[in-house]
Image: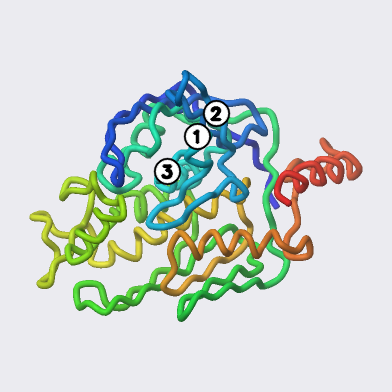
Amino acid sequence: MKASRQTTLRSPIVITGNGVHGGQPVRMTLHPAPAFNGVTFLRTNLANGHERLLEARHLAVSATALCTVIGDEETGSVATIEHVMSALAGLGVDNVCIEIDGPEVPILDGSAAEYVDAIEQVGVVEQAAFRRVIRVLRPVRVEMGRAFAEMRPYERGFRLDVEIDFDTAVIGRQRMVFDLSPAAYRREISRARTFGFMRDVEALWKAGFARGASLENTVALGDDGVLNPEGTRWPDEFVRHKILDAVGDLSLAGGQILGAYHSFCGGHRLNFMMLEALFADRANYAIVDTAPRREVGHAEAAVAAAAFASTIN
């Protein structure tokens, strides 16, 4: 495995916009963070001027209905984190503190493209510390009705094999196999937008979802096809967006994954179930330090890996 150093942002990024579900305006600042910080969310503007720091890890997930939520409503939560998490993971950014003054990450255009553009504008810098990656050691599978997801060993990086099957001609059955790298993510995945069916809008509104959705941030599907005047960005934009979401959700592992992920008819819930199953048994994975052997001794590496693993279990 090649030596790989941790990274952070060169300077802060300020992003404003509305949430797709709550529709509330939000100001969000992505701050550079020290090595081993990972991605954290500092939720501000809570009752009585309180703040709450949340780790972007699967252990902090509290809901997965139509989006991924960390924290809780009583003490502070952040919803719809998957797109910004996807952009950070897609571009290989390890350490960021995201300060946010509202309950939901801005939806922007419904993809990760604006996050990617903002990150690339300020730049990504390497840090002194080396990365620790999560190596999948044996197959792990979860199922939910006809939907399923599998994680398998794969030594050449992180591969996603995602397949969807909708009972509508405009989507139908789509599949894409994607090897994650910053260049490929930027080119093939980052611009894929979230999508939804007009027939579901009223029910979503009653359930408290999609109050900020519009043709500016969602690919809307009617009985006769796509309602957006510009159409889709790719014929298979739908499965590409599912990959975008999976990259973001699976980054809640807390480190880069060395393995292959395959899902069929999946979504946020199935992605989360996959992380729960992977980390349920220590025999499923190993924490691997990418530092050159000459710089980190075996004993030091073992201690560091054990410390990192203790934050996952």
Task: Give the CA separation, mark 1 to mark 3.
Answer: 10 Å
Q: Is residue 169 left or right of residue 110?
A: left
Q: Is residue 203 above or below residue 55?
A: below
At 15% from the left edge and 50% from the top edge, which residue is drawn?
215
Task: Give the CA separation, mark 3 to mark 2.
Answer: 14 Å
At 54% from the left edge and 54% from the top edge, which residue is drawn?
250
Q: Quadrant of residue 8?
A: top right
Residue 145 badge: none
Pointer 1 and pointer 2: residues touching (CB < 8 Å)?
yes
Front residue (pair 279, 1)? 279
Circle 1 Cα neighbour tier, 10 Å, few/some/many (<14 / 14–19 / ≥20)? many
Write down the residue under mark 2: 52
SS class of the residue under badge 2?
strand
Give the residue type that dot 1 points to.
Gly
Write down the residue under mark 1: 76
| Position of residue 26 measured from the top left corner of the image (x, y, whole percent) | 33, 30
SS class of the residue under badge 3?
strand
| Position of residue 294 measured from the top left corner of the image (x, y, whole percent) | 84, 39
Give the residue type that dot 3 points to.
Ala
Of all residues, the one furthest to the top in this rendering is 49
Residue 79 badge: 3
Give the residue type that dot 2 points to.
Arg
